[in-house]
Amino acid sequence: MLLPRFLEIISKIFPTNPLAGHEEALSKLNPDKIYVENVRSALDVSYQSAVRLCETAVRQGLFERGVEVHCPDGVVGATAADEAHLPPTVHCWQQDGEEFEEVDLPTDTLRKTTFYRLNDKSASVLYR
């Protein structure tokens, strides 16, 4: 799908070919939720290099950036294009003894993770 364009961006960022032997790992990334750590691991590069790669893909229009907020148990409570668009509270489940209860927690107190997704709009550019 968009893998050829993604690989082209990678080859422009890294002077040596970091893809040798990593194409299969890259092709297994979820195109709707690409995490920096997954890119770092797939390419065996530093975290900073993986961030640089993802941010370059955003600037090139290949990726879109998003943010997700995590409930205390690690479950994703909400996602948005940026932190400003996250809801003020999220519904999470908390264990109270042996029972679980749904609680609303303030988003600003919870852990957030940046993720990337392939930009479907860029697909038309790739297949002209």
Image (spheres, rainbow, N blue to C red):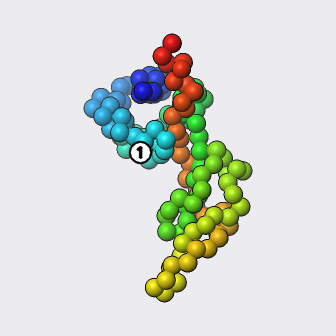
- Most foreground residue, 49 or 120: 120
- The answer to whether residue 62 shows anywhere in this view is yes
**What's the residue at 33%, 38% (across, down)?**
25
**What's the residue at 53%, 45% (across, down)?**
115
**Residue 112 percent across, percent down from the top left:** 58, 56
**Residue 48 percent across, percent down from the top left:** 50, 42
**What's the residue at 49%, 41% (across, down)?**
32
Q: Is residue 107 above or below residue 26?
A: below
**Residue 78 percent across, percent down from the top left:** 60, 56
In the picture as drawn, the residue positioned furthest to the left comes out as: 21
- Most foreground residue, 50 or 94: 94
The residue that label 1 is drawn on is 38
- The answer to whether residue 51 shows anywhere in this view is no
**What's the residue at 51%, 34% (across, down)?**
118
Q: Is residue 100 above or below residue 53?
A: below
**Residue 46 percent across, percent down from the top left:** 43, 42
87 displayed left or right of 101? right
Q: Is residue 112 above or below residue 38?
A: below
Q: Quadrant of residue 121?
A: top right
